[in-house]
Image: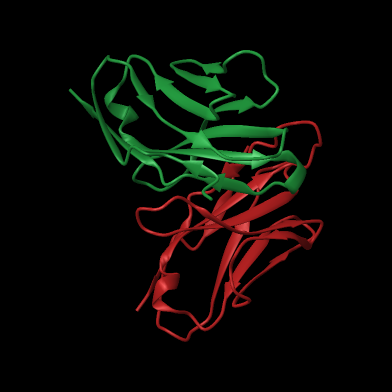
């Protein structure tokens, strides 16, 4: 079974609007971390936001917030006030604490911000 | 403070050849992980090195091997190259610190093309 599932291959959003990128995960480890990375065309993975499995509140980092629904095993990324520079690939990833530092990545969502 | 660096940036090899990719971790980091990212896919974990030993390995054949040096830098070696080895190879570093979420910082990657 896939550890991380991203069902949106491509998304479009109008500049200054908000957009939600979906991510569901699968794990039996009670202790895990969820991450979102941005990958521009240059290739480098840029860390955006983190959510721990025991965190009570949804994580926020500037214009990024993570909508964490533990019972549904979803960790959607919300980008508010989209900017042209947000156009990139976005990857959801998970690390299971009790099985080491390996990160599992989804297949990514390509976000295009329209002026 | 230098981030994760990788060399070379691009590489072209022919089938059957061998290749070595290099990675220097972010200052203060002691763990290096390698990922293979095929075109249009998410990164796939190859292996991780800590204290000069391979700690964890993904589902990759023995043609993929690595090394970590006392200064924490690392090499990824691929023998008997196949066309399917063409990909972006990403190095990520982190610091072992149990109880923390061990964010991984990624390098810019090495794009390998096998002809």
Relative placement, left or right, of B98 versus A10 is right
A96 over B23 or under it: above or below? above
A3 over A62 or under it: above or below? below
Q: Quadrant of residue A33?
A: top right
At x 48%, y 54%, the residue is B109
A42 over A64 or under it: above or below? below
A6 over A51 or under it: above or below? below
Residue that protrudes farthest toward the bottom in the picture: B16
- x%, y% of residue A85? 31, 28
Relative placement, left or right, of B80 versus B66 is left
Relative placement, left or right, of B49 versus B83 is right
Q: How is the image coloured?
A: by chain
Give the colour chain B carries in the figure: red
- x%, y% of residue A30? 72, 33
- x%, y% of residue A6? 41, 39
At x 31%, y 19%, the residue is A82
Q: Quadrant of residue B53?
A: bottom right
Residue B100 can be seen in this image: yes
- x%, y% of residue A73? 55, 30
Q: Which chain appears green?
A: A
At x 43%, y 16%, the residue is A63
Q: Quadrant of the C terminus of chain A?
A: top left
Q: Quadrant of residue B69?
A: bottom right
Residue that protrudes farthest toward the left in the picture: A115
Task: Please tell me how many numbered marks the rendered image carries.
Answer: 0
Residue B3 can be seen in this image: no
**In front of the other: B9 or A59:** A59
């Amino acid at each position: 079974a896939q550890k991380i599932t991203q069902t949106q291959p491509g998304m479009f959003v109008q500049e200054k609007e908000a957009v939600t990128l979906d991510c569901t995960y699968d794990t039996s480890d009670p202790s895990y971390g969820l991450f979102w990375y941005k990958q521009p065309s240059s290739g480098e993975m840029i860390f955006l936001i983190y959510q721990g499995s025991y965190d009570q509140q949804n994580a926020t980092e500037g214009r990024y917030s993570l909508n964490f629904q533990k019972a549904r095993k979803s960790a959607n990324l919300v980008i508010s006030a989209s900017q042209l520079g947000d156009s990139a690939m976005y990857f959801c990833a998970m690390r299971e604490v009790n099985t080491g530092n390996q990160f599992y990545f989804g297949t990514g969502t390509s976000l295009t911000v329209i002026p | 403070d230098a981030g994760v660096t990788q060399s070379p940036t691009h590489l072209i090899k022919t089938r059957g050849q061998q290749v070595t990719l290099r990675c220097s971790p972010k200052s203060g980091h002691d763990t290096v992980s390698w990922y293979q990212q095929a075109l249009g896919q998410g990164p796939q974990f190859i292996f991780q090195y800590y204290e000069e030993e391979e700690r964890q390995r993904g589902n990759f054949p023995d043609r993929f091997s690595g090394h970590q040096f006392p200064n924490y830098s690392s090499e990824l070696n691929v023998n008997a190259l196949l066309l399917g080895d063409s990909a972006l190879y990403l190095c990520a570093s982190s610091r072992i610190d149990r109880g923390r979420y061990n964010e991984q910082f990624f390098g810019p990657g090495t794009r390998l093309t096998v002809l």
